[in-house]
Amino acid sequence: MTRQYAFHVDISKCTGCKTCQVACKDKNNLPSGIRWRRVFQYEGGEWIEKDGQMIPSNVFAYFVSSACMHCEKPICEQVCPTKATYKREDGIVLIDQDRCIGCRYCSWACPYGAPQFNPEINAMSKCTFCYDLIEKGESPACVDSCPFRAVDFGPLEEIRAKFGTFSSPAPLPKPDITHPAIVYTPNGSTKSSGDVSGQLKNIEEV
């Protein structure tokens, strides 16, 4: 493999506007109910008693923009019975929809729920990293659309050298299963995977 492309998301800049999500749906002409990029809203805090009153304490909230992680060890590729899911030399994980039988094994195995069944084509679908744009020297739609430049991409080694290696903000799962090709820059209140002090507040949306 010549390189491994990766996303970088700066949680400290993300406002949860979902422009990245809308741009992805528009560029890929996705039907209703299918979201290749999703924005998780994670919040938490507690109430404490002070002077006879209950006041909020340790309150936090942040957004996590997430799509297919184009993992270094994609379990979706491992479980696909027809080998429709495959990893390119540049690390981008794709689905050959002509070979896909829609069994949903990839969706069940993926800890991020990235592959989604598209009833219009009777096959699984997922983020393609906008490889068609990258091959023309352009950026993925989600990257170019972000008004706060919270989403970026590049070779994984370069992303890690610049932004570190943190890849598991709550509410996302721990990265040890698939080794996702993603780096998140946390804000001051970002929790790590496995945190139980907060809750996902937009379950219906993601």
Image (cartoon, rainbow, N blue to C red):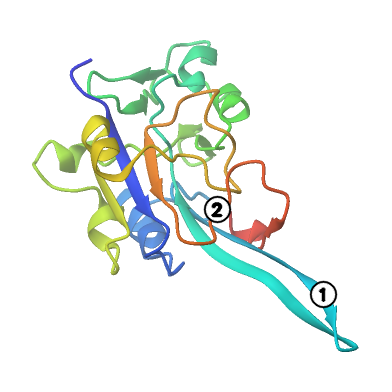
Earlier sequence position, callout 2 versus callout 1: 2
**Which residue occupies the extreme front position in the image?**
51
50 left or right of 185 in image = right
Q: Is residue 121 above or below residue 4?
A: below
Instruction: Please give the residue where the numbered disc 2 appears in the rendered image.
Output: 33
96 left or right of 176 in image = left
In the image shown, does 170 or 36 lie closer to the viewer?
170
Q: Residue 138 got which mark?
A: none
Element carrying mark 2: loop
Instruction: Please give the residue where the numbered disc 1 appears in the rendered image.
Output: 48
Q: Within the image, what quadrant is residue 148 found in?
A: bottom left
In the image shown, does 173 or 92 lie closer to the viewer?
173
Q: Is residue 164 above or below residue 188?
A: above
In the image shown, does 43 or 76 lie closer to the viewer?
43
| Crowd tier of the residue under label 1, counting other residues whose Cα lies within 10 Å: few below 14, some 14–19, many 20 or above | few
The structure residue drawn at horizontal position 43% and vertical position 40%, both measured from the top left corner, is 166
